[in-house]
Image (tube, rainbow, N blue to C red):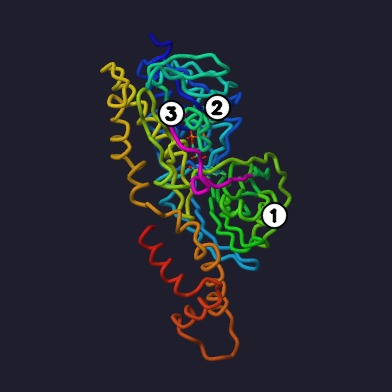
Amino acid sequence: MSEFDVIIVGAGPAGASAAIKLAGAGSSVLLVERGDPPGSKNVSGGVLWGDSLGSVAPDWEKAAPMERYVEAKGVSFLTKDSKISIDFRSKKLQERRSGYTVLRTKLDGWLSKKAKDAGAMVASGITVDKLAFKDDRVIGVEQDGDIITSDIVILAEGANPRVAINSGIRERLKDRDVAIGVKEIIKLPEKTINERFNLTSSKMGFASEYVLGFLEGGVKAGGFIYTNKESISLGLVISMKEMRQNNNTRSFDLIEQFKEHPYIAPLIDGGRVDEYSAHMVQEGGLKSVPQLYGNGFMVVGDGAGFSFSNGMVLQGMNYAIASGIAAAESAIKAKIKSNFTMEGLSSYEERLKSSFVLQDLMNFKGIEEVTWSDMIHRGIPNMSEELFLSLFSENGQPKAHMINLLIRAMGHSDVPRKDMVINMYRMLRRM
Ligand SMILES: Cc1cc2nc3c(=O)[nH]c(=O)nc-3n(C[C@H](O)[C@H](O)[C@H](O)COP(=O)(O)OP(=O)(O)OC[C@H]3O[C@@H](n4cnc5c(N)ncnc54)[C@H](O)[C@@H]3O)c2cc1C
């Protein structure tokens, strides 16, 4: 007989949500987390989109440590001298409470406590080495040669899935699977944040993604700025391939270039860097999804490749929570039938397929090729800068029609027009 019904590796949003659901349903659960306390190893932008948390914590909007709800959402293209932005503000976003900014140290601590309160055993400060097998079935986890047994193991170890790789249930990561995320938390007074981001209350938040078309060496990266109550989360997501191809590129140089941009620097002026962190970001789309379940195990969250990024939003926490809950539900079903085999856990994939988790990945298959394309990172920023300069400069000459300005502006980007048109068509289809 196993020591636990379920062992969960990793107390991020995926693992903690699975633990809350399972313990709440009466299963004996061990939630193992290498960070002590939970959350101390985690990095996220982060905006928590959607209401997936509602199914494990119905009162989450009031009880969870949310910073600000996103009422202002931006998307900007930056060139060396310009910022071309959409700044969407809507009372309707406020009514829908679409997204909240969060700080992971607080959120993960809260989720782990919820798991503990529901009856799970939370073991923090322990790093699982690999899965333990008997014949072809997972029977628990191994750490420093000790084996703890369970009927099912849920791997919720995030974007760097070493346990899965060390256990031979997935391949090593490829450059296309992940990007590098670097982030700073910059302290500023609440009032200053409200004034700088034009926020009328301290509950209201601003979240924006930036395409950084000006970085030295043409490195492709996206930036983000999210407002917390008394701090700003500012960071970059950088293509792993680009980093590898250009040995001179250092993530900390790139974040400095972002911070020094003429239209970013005033937003953080006088702020104090309180935290600096780096983490892998799951980016590979459907191609990065590994085997999701097998005899005695399931894989959830970033470790399963579940994330969505289209340059306008970066989402992973909502997929992590939803997949953690789906795995928990399948584990509950498997326990009822006492069937922990691959067949007994197959309902996990069915649940994911009938939810946004796998549907988004399937519907937006290949989107990462658009997100990291030359068109997005060099073409559009340069083209739109030229277009708006033409539109908003008066030089005493007859005005040209928009279509002519657009064609001319396309010539100002170093991406060939033919590639721009093909990629724009691809972008419209894939986005
Ligand atoms: C810079 C950056 C910005 C992001 N911005 C956003 C955003 O704005 N919105 C959004 O939704 N998502 C964002 N994401 C993605 C989001 O953070 C992830 O999708 C999400 O955290 C995945 O949750 P998870 O539970 O699967 O993994 P994680 O949150 O990574 O949790 C995994 C946990 O497992 C633990 N662990 C790992 N290995 C072991 C082991 N061997 N033994 C024990 N414990 C282990 C880790 O310490 C960690 O606590 C961002 C990510 C980064 C890096």
Say which mark, if any, is on residue 109. Answer: 2
Amino acid on which the number 1 mark rests in the picture? Asn
Say which mark, if any, is on residue 17. Answer: 3
| CA gap, disc 2 and disc 3 | 12 Å
Q: Residue at x 41, y 16 (%)?
A: 150
Q: Quadrant of the N terminus?
A: top left
Asked which secondary structure carries label 1, the reply is: loop
- Determine whether 275 is above or below 347 in the image: below
Q: Residue at x 41, y 28 (%)?
A: 57
Do tag 2 and tag 1 residues touch (Cβ < 8 Å)?
no
Q: Residue at x 64, y 40 (%)?
A: 277
Amino acid on which the number 3 mark rests in the picture? Ser
Amino acid on which the number 2 mark rests in the picture? Gly
Q: Residue furthest left?
A: 337
- Bin the neighbour count of mark 3 within 10 Å (Cα to Cα): few under 14, some 14-19, many 20 and up: many
Dot 2 or dot 1, earlier in sequence = 2
Does the segment drawn in magenta span residue 2? no
